[in-house]
Image: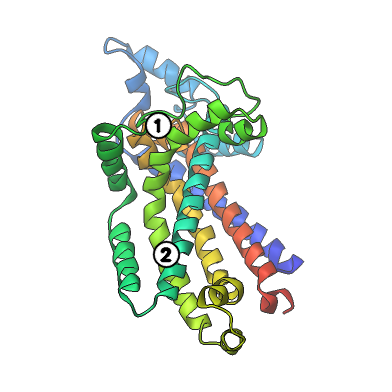
Amino acid sequence: MTLRALSIRLASMIVTLFGVAVVVFVVIRVAPGDPIAMMLPPGATDADIERLRALYGLDKSVVEQFLIWLAGVVQGDFGTSISLRQDVMGIVLSRLPATLELAFAALVIATVMGMALAIIGTRRRATRTEAAVDLWNGMTLSIPDFLWGLIFILVLGVAIPLFPVSGRIAPALNPDYLTNFLLFESILRLDFAVFGNLVTHMTLPALALALPLSAVIAQVLKQSLKEVMGLDYVMLSRAKGFSEFAVIWREALRNAMLPTLTLVGVQFTFLIGGTVIVEKLFSYEGLGNLAIDAVINRDLPLIQGIVLIFSVLFIVINLAVDLAYAALNPRLRHG
């Protein structure tokens, strides 16, 4: 990607974020419900309501509110949460690491499963094994992640209680780490007690998120492998006496992975957004769970902050995927 193309992409990112900010700001203000009335007890007077409205700037016009909020966002100030009475940016940044770790764990599981299924299906093509792989992919893809979550809770959390079904970590541990990236920091500190507890809490929600994505990866990669397996250099490898698995692993997989890489990157953004319901289902202390609470409480500043942070993540990840694809694809790299 050239410097000019990158500059244009960055400019479009800024325009996109501005558009998202406008849409979210307007939409949540025309939605029914009064966040100030929800904060006050039933006996509150009109003076109390007006006082709180002025405190949160809700007594001004929508245009004035937007301009004030936008000026604060540019300076890193997303306002104060109405329901939690805390700085929005601080709340979001404290919850974001949990969501990113969960999404990353789900992505790793989905990629490993998807690659394994694709290789098995390609290696055993036109057999019952490939039919079984296609059947499994179809089944996992047809069941949404939140329903997988319910199944895992009932089977592996209640009927056979192998994993905890609530929270991110056992309250008794409460590690005093420098960041809230508890999983990554526990690895760096070689704190196996915390790491093991985090993994057990993360397993079921990560699997629920990973299974539908693994089916998508398996289908796309298997199709790419089938196309690559008919190319000349693959036929030459077979003629040299390499086993079918070696041909797939050493020769075909590298070129077949390029479209899959783009898919994984794009799906990772949807995976982060998909954590919302799954986090709530497992009471996982991440940004998705916080988003649902913010909507229920109609916490306008918190909703705006969460949506904008999600948007930034989506745009940055998609840009990173495009850069990686351009770096790995020789035709784009030398074009």
Please tell me whether residue 111 is drawn above or below residue 181 in the rendered image. Answer: below
Give the mark nearest the N terminus, 1 or 2: 2
Q: Position of residue 288 (x, y in %)?
A: 43, 38
| Disc 1: CA contacts within 10 A as few (<14), some (14-19) or many (>=20) | many
Image side of residue 87 versus residue 160, left or right: right
Q: Position of residue 187 (x, y in %)?
A: 62, 35
Q: Position of residue 289 (x, y in %)?
A: 40, 34
What residue is shown with label 1?
A: 294
Tell me whether the residue at label 1 lies in contact with that at label 2, contact meaning CB atoms closer than 8 angstroms.
Answer: no
Please tell me whether residue 75 is drawn above or below residue 7 in the rendered image. Answer: above
Circle 2: residue type: Leu
Separation of residues labelled 1 and 2 (CA atoms): 39 Å
Q: Nearer the viewer, residue 90 or 140?
A: 140
Task: Residue at 36%, 26% (x, y): give it.
Answer: 35
Marker disc for residue 59: none
Task: Residue at 35%, 28% (x, y): give it.
Answer: 297
Marker disc for residue 117: 2
